[in-house]
Amino acid sequence: MAEWVRQMTDPLRFVVLVGVSFSALGMLLAFAGVYGLTADLSQRSLREIGIRKALGATTGNVIRWFMYRSTKPAVPALLIGAVVGIGLVRALSSEVEGVGFGSFWVIPVVVALFAALVLGATYASSRRAAGVDPALTMRSE
C-alpha cells in the first residue's frame, strides 16, 4: 500500500520540487537585486556616511539611518503587492479550483518573506557601508 501511495504521489512531488526550486531561485535573485541597489546607494553615499562618522555617529546610528533610508520605498511596494494579491485571490477564487479564501494566509506569508528579504539585503549592505573609515572618504575627494 505504501508503494502504491508513493507511486501515485510521485508526479505531484516532482511538480512541488520544481516549484520550490524556482521559488528559491526567484528569492535569491530578488535578494541579489535589492542588495545590488542598496550597495549602489551606499557607494553613492560614502561621503555623507564618512561625514556622519567624522561628526561622531556610531556604526549603529549609521546602520539605522541607512536602513531607514533604503527600506522606505519598499513599504508602499509591499502594501501594493498585498492589495493586488488580495484582488487576485478574489478574482481567481471563482475561476480556478482550489483557490479561495482558504489560501488567503499565503499573502501575509509572502509579504513577510519579502519584507525579511528587503531587511536582510539592506542590513548586509548598510553594515558594509558603516565600516567605512571617515578619513579615507574625506581624502578621496
Image: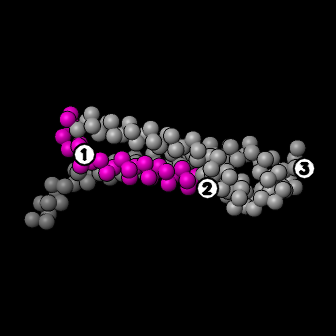
Q: Position of residue 44 (x, y in %)?
A: 74, 42
Quadrant of the rendered structure where residue 74 is? top right
Q: Which mark is residue 124?
A: none
Q: In this rendering, would 141 be left or right of 108? A: right
Q: What amino acid is labelled 3 in the image?
A: Arg
- Quadrant for the C terminus, please: top right
Q: In this rendering, would 2 be left or right of 141? A: left
Residue ID at (77%, 59%): 57
Q: Which mark is residue 101?
A: 1
Q: Position of residue 51 (x, y in %)?
A: 82, 51
Label 3 sits on a secondary structure element that is helix
Relative to 111, residue 96 above or below: above
Q: Position of residue 78 (x, y in %)?
A: 47, 43
Q: Which residue is mark 2?
A: 123
Residue ID at (87%, 47%): 140
Cβ–Cβ under 8 Å for marks 3 and 1: no
Q: What amino acid is labelled 1 in the image?
A: Phe
Magenta segment boundaries in residue numbering: 94-121
Q: Is residue 25 visible?
A: no
Q: What amino acid is labelled 2 in the image?
A: Tyr
Q: Residue furthest left?
A: 1
Looking at marks 3 and 2 on the same chain, the residue that comes earlier in the sequence is marked by 2
Q: Residue furthest bottom?
A: 2
Q: CA distance from mark 3 to mark 1?
A: 59 Å
Q: Which residue is mark 3?
A: 139
3 vs 138, nearest the viewer: 138
Task: Look at the image and name its color scheme.
Answer: one colour
